[in-house]
Amino acid sequence: MNPDKPTAAAAAFKELKERAGAQLTQLTHDKTVIMVGTATCGCAAGALEVLQTFKDEVKKRNLGCAVIEVGCMGHCYAEPMVIIRKPNSPGVCYAHVNPVIAERLVNEYILGENPCPEFVLAAFEPNDILPSFQDFPRSRYEQKIILQNCGHIEPTKIEHYIVAGGYIALAKALEASPENIIEEVEKSGLRGRGGAGFSTGQKWRLCRQSPGNTKYVICNADEGDPGAFIDRALLESDPHSVIEGMIIAAYAIGARTGYIYVRAEYPLAVERLEIALKQAKKLNLTGAHILGSDFCFNIHLFKGSGAFVCGEETALIASLEGHAGMPHHRPPYPTTHGLHGKPTIVNNVKTLAYVRHIINNGADWFAGIGTKKSPGTAVFALAGKIVNTGLVEVPMGTTLRQIIYDVGSGIPGGKQFKAVQIGGPSGGCLPESALDLPVDFNSLKEAGAIMGSGGMVVLDEDDCMVEMARYFLEFTQRESCGKCTFCRLGTKQMLEILTEFTFGKGRIEDLDNLERLAEEVKAGSLCALGRTAPNPILTTLRYFRQEYEDHIRLGKCPALMCQHLIAYYILPDKCERSCDACIGSCTVEAISPNKKRIKVIDQTQCVKCGTCLKACPPQYNAIVKLTPPSEVPNDNSKLKNQISKPQIKSKN
Amino acid sequence: MTKDKETVMLTMNGQTITAKSGTKLLWAALDNGIYIPNLCAMRDKPEPEAACRLCWVEIEGRQSPITACTEPVAAGMVVNTTGEKALKLARTGFELLMASHALDCARCSANGSCELQKIAKVLKCSLKPKRFRQLLRGLPVDESNPLFTYDPNKCVLCGRCVWVCRKHVKSGVLGFAHRGFERRITTFGDEPIGKDCLNCSACVKACPTGALTMKDGKKKTDIA
Ligand SMILES: Cc1cc2nc3c(=O)[nH]c(=O)nc-3n(C[C@H](O)[C@H](O)[C@H](O)COP(=O)(O)O)c2cc1C
Ligand code: SF4
Ligand code: SF4
Ligand code: FES
């Protein structure tokens, strides 16, 4: 690299950036900009109607505002979200916007001076009037690297990305040698975010060193994990950051062709990627002689069928080649025998999104964030019993407690925290005692979970750990490709045992059987799907064994979740005689009044749907769940006998 | 010099054996008279299937057992095919297969030549494992072929029939279908086997179990 003599790439990029800047200024300069978050999470909450309202209002009143669509800021709990930036004012972020609020914002803030504090989530810059994001406790912990642009730029405009600092890293990388790039990435300590946490630099080096002229880069955007939506959000909100990472990776390993393997079930991600790829090609950021250099690289989009196992790299490659998505034995690894037998790197969406930041800011900067063995940030998709669902990006080493309580604002409804499930069906359930664990690849693995795809589901006292394990096993069992014995039959056997537990039918020896089989499936399966499928079982057994024993020995589900182990019961002294809300709510007519007009559930009829519990007015709150079902007082049967059917009929 | 490069010396169960470099441990063992349970391996397959998960061996210096069909020999390697850890995994794999196998030896024409019986003996396992719940699939038996019967309930999904079939009929009559527990050998579009089949019976000969058997009662070993 010679800083004094700018290369062709640098010069070409400079021109590109100036043009992009000019274009963007033309669009937004001196104008109020209204940004509506229309990633999948926003759309699900009604963002498209809000978008339309703003567009209509702006047109109708000739306001001259720019209305643009942006991606996901990570505050999914507050969707639909809108950002309004007036010239010379701090940008203001509004939460839970609907068309009515949108109209008010136009009238009062855009046309007037009232920022409508009642709808404000926060302002972006500290100011005297409104609270700002900097005041949120979570801002102490959050550090956005790959989510930086998400929700702030227009994902369908490459100019916006470039003005926000995009593609600088590519121009810089093209001036360096591929070896330099690999060295930098290796030195940064970046580990793959697709689950296993393999060193990215090392992977690239192995591939570069593999003999052959044809090599491939594959971006793994299969994200089949239930509960994970980080890759989706990134692709919908900032697709170019992933594309830029891919181009740099290709340059480093010497690939001329790349594929993005994306789930067909992510239509918006597919759409935005298609647009982004077209734009990148048009500006010669992909294609022949990128930015005037000798480097040529093309990216193709491949829509996967969406099977979970297709995210496993060897299955993904088989699927790309047109075969059934079945894993095969490794070694050989893709770095030597990948797509069409050629050296290939498979990297996760997030992994690739980090690359440009490492090139821009240097390996030491990245290595200085997070923990020694897992540098950088961790991105989690917070879900379940947590106030702030959505995406968080925190330095590795942040504790679970900080993530759940400070960033996520804790458990809603004053309920008690019970466990946190990390890493989806391949991950594990960690208990309260693990809350002070600083999370990184190694600590999670030691505790029995994995980083996986970044799904983090918080569970409270109403969640049953046995049911949790059964739920995930049902998923992996269904998603097993069926090729190898341990996964195909072992997961089925384990599911069978777990299902019996939730019916209160297990035997106590089955606990040891289950644990042993889980260990063996872990050791014996061909690919990581089978090798990690037992994790939810092993961790719940390790941390919540008592709960399993309660199911088996006492037929009791302490969380009152397993339907077969609970009964609904109406407390006679709480039941209000004049009310019959529950009677009408019961779909199977299992509830009827006794002589004193106290309502009684016929346990033999009850299908345990729980509608009556919701129907009972809160001021009476007379219906409870009991476990085991034998807890229902005996006199119930006596009461039951006094009820005559005609009485029910006359009631209706 | 080149000759030395081509053959490799290693130790297996205390015995020194030689094998061509690149050979997988499973074949090296079998060629030297050491039996390792296996169902899915085929010598002429370029990539091992590695699906049955029975061929576990222990290799000195490795923490956990390795499948012998996937691991190439290496000079000086010390292999134990009868280590406790390896046997334990092999037994579990075998018992899982048997728990989903429609066991009926007395009336099965594979009786006596069945590799499952052989493996049970080697592993000292019962053919009817108590450890697991019996999970059968109850699939219909295909009698459509004039020469042989296909009983999916006895199939262990080793894939040998699929492989040999591909060699005779280019597009292959037999193939895998469905996922997970539902995975089975079937024909394209689940048509009865009779339709495009050349009646070469190569699949019956290759099948290690009673899933594919001759209707005339001929033993697999007698198929030309
Ligand atoms: C069943 C299964 C599903 C997987 N799904 C994904 C996925 O959706 N996305 C992903 O990036 N990696 C997934 N992986 C991991 C990949 O095999 C591979 O390790 C990863 O893409 C490598 O990228 P990285 O080095 O950037 O992490 C999966 C692995 C398994 C076993
Ligand atoms: S572990 Fe499961 S998904 Fe992986 S190869 Fe075996 S059966 Fe298929
Ligand atoms: S039919 Fe026989 S050869 Fe074919 S997969 Fe089943 S067990 Fe193997
Ligand atoms: S012979 Fe090795 S896994 Fe089947």
Image: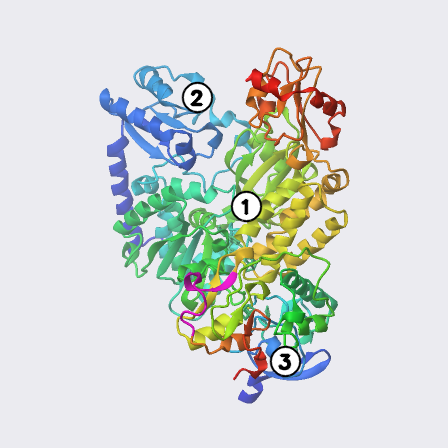
Residue carrying label 3: B30
Residue carrying label 2: A120
Q: Position of residue A545 (x, y in %)?
A: 73, 43
Instruction: Give amino acid for label 2.
Output: Val
| Residue A634 counted in the magenta span | no
**The quadrant where residue A72 appears:** top left
**The quadrant where residue A17 appears:** top left
**The quadrant where residue A594 appears:** top right
Do the residues at discs 3 and 1 belong to one chain? Answer: no
Confirm whether residue B42 shows in the render: no
Q: Quadrant of ligand 3?
A: bottom right
Instruction: Give amino acid for label 1.
Output: Gly
- Which numbered disc, 2 or 3, marks the residue closer to the eye? 3
Label placed on residue A368: 1
Near-viewer residue (B187 or A102): B187
Q: Position of residue A565 (x, y in %)?
A: 69, 35
Label 3's element?
helix
